[in-house]
Image (tube, rainbow, N blue to C red):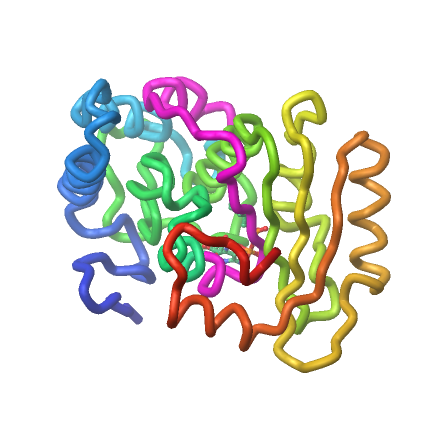
Amino acid sequence: SMSVQLGDNTQTTTKGTTTNLKTVVIERCRDYIRTFPQMSSNNCDAIWEAFQNSFLGKDPCNVKVEDYDLFITTVQQDIPCNKSLFWSKTSQIAHDFAKATKCLMTLEDTLLGYMMDGLKWCGKQHSKELNYTSCPGWVECELNPVRSFWRRASAHFAELACGNVMVMLNGSIDTPFNKQSIFGSVEIKRFDSEKINYISIRVIDSLQDRVSCNSMSLEDLGKILKNASLNFDCKDIDKSEVERCINDPIPHSCDCVN
Ligand code: AVW
């Protein structure tokens, strides 16, 4: 089974490494630098080398989060304060919102996330080659190369967060805040109360009059943030309201979710 994203030559669900992984990663890297010339201190060939050294030659079920440490430091990017948008189970609407309003950026809007978004990769033990035949799925084994990368990149993105940040959660599910998610298990632990002024939690509800901010799940999140001395507020926002902002964006304005 294989699905192909339209407008993008990248397979999202092939069984093995994404076809032409090296070309795709390097071209995305150059594309990003063309769009953001302030990023031109980055060398896309060096970035590719550091990336593949993180997992090549390793058992694809034993790639550790720390195996990406060197790669993460190879990518140079300043994330401005007051811009970071975290999300959990709201991928589509959070990315559409960031793209339309241009007032916030997700991990996938940074060079690291942009390069790897939707790709799949793994190597084989004792081999210098990529495995195009078969790679472990997200839940098949915990220490798979893709999952470990996203955990590492997410930790980094959360460590860099400063000023006022936003989190978009999904109010249509029972546990908008899931302790097992990357947001709940990685990012929240890396937030630094010395650098973060305020966390705006926005729960996107598809049913009107949902009060997810008062749910047990959000209470759990509130306790964790209080214990970490992090300031926050929580608001329920109708999905239709966010969609209106996406379809008719007021440039450089986040007003629809404030
Ligand atoms: P998510 P998170 N199989 O919406 O808080 C395949 O749950 O975890 O939000 N891929 C998966 C699976 C799975 N079972 N579970 C998760 N993923 C992948 C980085 C998939 O690509 C950003 F900064 C899915 O779209 C956010 O703040 C993605 O993980 C935070 O972490 C998100 O799963 C979102 O991670």
Foreground residue among 67 and 107: 107
- The percent position of residue 103, horizontal first and vertical second, equals 44, 47
Location of the C terminus by quadrant is: bottom right
Q: Is residue 75 magenta?
A: yes
48 is within the stretch colored magenta: no
Q: Residue at x 21, y 69 (%)?
A: 6
Q: Is residue 99 left or right of residue 133?
A: right
Could you tell me how many numbered marks the image carries? Answer: 0
Q: Quadrant of residue 40?
A: top left
Q: Quadrant of the N terminus?
A: bottom left
Q: Nearer the viewer, residue 8 or 146?
A: 8
Measuring 50% from the left and 54% from the top, which residue is drawn there? 254
In the rendered image, residue 105, in percent from the top left (x then y), is placed at: 43, 44
User: In the rendered view, does 149 fall on the left or right side of 160?
Assistant: left
| Residue at x 19%, y 27% (from the top left corner) | 44
Question: Height in image: 65 above or below 83?
Answer: above
68 relative to 91, above or below: above
Residue 43 figure quarter = top left
- Above or below, comparing residue 99 to residue 74 in the picture: below
In the orientation shown, which residue stands out farthest toward the bottom?
208
**Residue 88 point in image, percent of width and height:** 58, 55
Residue 194 is situated, as x and y percent measured from the top left of the image, at 69, 21
Span highlighted in magenta in the image: 65-94
Image-based side of 107 in relation to 208, left or right: left
